[in-house]
């Protein structure tokens, strides 16, 4: 099935179940785009062993791209948004859960209500630059999306408070770790 199918689902399922293992995306990596799909679903590293026989330059191509993403964002394997198929780390980029969307299913997986999730995120941002956000959708950057997704509202706040994209993303990464450290139940494949 390749990087588009079961490999990505398997990565996401394993990452949703635990953050305690080093996860390697192991199949169908032919270029950086394939690697990025795996990173966005929880892979810490990818294997390009099969492809390297055909293209020995793939190592340099992927490493240079990973380094560029790391320099630009501070989190080379940041998850996709939950609504885009990302793993549970993506809860850090979710909006305030006030309408029907997939965030509710993700919260159910970890045994958390929408209210508990909202309180947890708002508690986390207190005393951090993420507490700011007047003019954003929900008045605080607790609810803002990935920096790689264009948003002039978030970017205006980042500029106003002098927070770089890397600093913003690293705070969001810490928030993801905080959210998942407060999960009330472990995820099973049938959840």
Image (tube, rainbow, N blue to C red):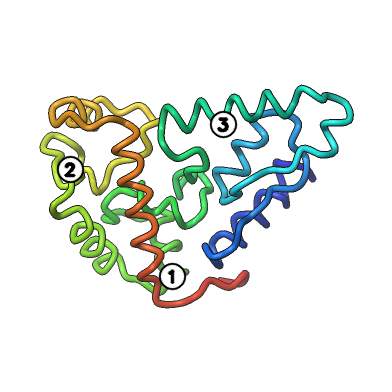
Q: Residue at coordinates 39% horizontally, 54% vertically from top-left? A: 91
Q: Earlier in the sequence, mark 2 or mark 3?
A: 3
Q: Secondary structure at mark 3?
A: helix
Determine contact: label 2, label 3, CB under 8 Å.
no
Marks 1/3: CA–CA distance = 30 Å
Element on which disc 2 rests: helix
Q: Residue at x 36, y 46 (%)?
A: 93
The disc placed on residue 66 is: 3
Residue 7 at what x, y percent from top left? Answer: 72, 50
In percent of the image, x 38 and y 55: which residue is there?
176
Q: Nearer the viewer, residue 139 or 61?
A: 61
Image location (x, y in percent) of residue 143: 26, 47
Occupied quadrant, residue 124:
bottom left
x and y percent of residue 99 in the render? Answer: 30, 54
Q: Residues within 10 Å of mark 2 (few under 14, many from 20)?
A: some
- The answer to whether mark 1 and mark 2 are in CB contact below 8 A is no
Image coordinates for residue 154, horizontal then vertical, percent: 24, 32
Is 112 left or right of 85, judged from the image as shown? left
**Left or right: where does residue 30 sit relative to residue 161?**
right
Most distant residue in the right direction? 53
Q: Is residue 120 above or below residue 166?
A: below
Q: Quadrant of the N terminus?
A: top right
Mark 1 vs mark 2: which is more N-terminal?
1
Mark 2 — residue? 129
């Amino acid at each position: 099935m390749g990087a588009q199918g079961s490999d990505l689902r398997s990565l996401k399922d394993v990452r949703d179940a635990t953050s305690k293992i080093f996860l390697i995306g192991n199949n169908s990596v032919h270029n950086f785009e394939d690697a990025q799909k795996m990173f966005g679903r929880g892979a810490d590293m990818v294997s390009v062993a099969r492809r390297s026989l055909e293209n020995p330059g793939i190592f340099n191509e992927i490493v240079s791209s990973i380094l560029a993403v790391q320099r630009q964002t501070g989190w080379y394997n940041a998850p996709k948004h939950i609504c885009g198929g990302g793993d549970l780390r993506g809860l850090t980029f979710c909006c305030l859960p006030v309408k029907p969307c997939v965030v509710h299913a993700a919260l159910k997986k970890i045994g958390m209500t929408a209210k508990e999730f909202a309180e947890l995120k708002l508690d986390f941002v207190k005393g951090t630059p993420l507490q700011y956000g007047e003019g954003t959708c929900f008045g605080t950057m607790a609810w803002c999306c990935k920096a790689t997704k264009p948003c002039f509202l978030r970017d205006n706040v980042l500029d106003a408070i002098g927070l770089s994209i890397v600093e913003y993303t690293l705070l969001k990464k810490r928030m993801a770790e905080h959210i998942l450290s407060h999960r009330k139940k472990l995820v099973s494949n049938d959840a």
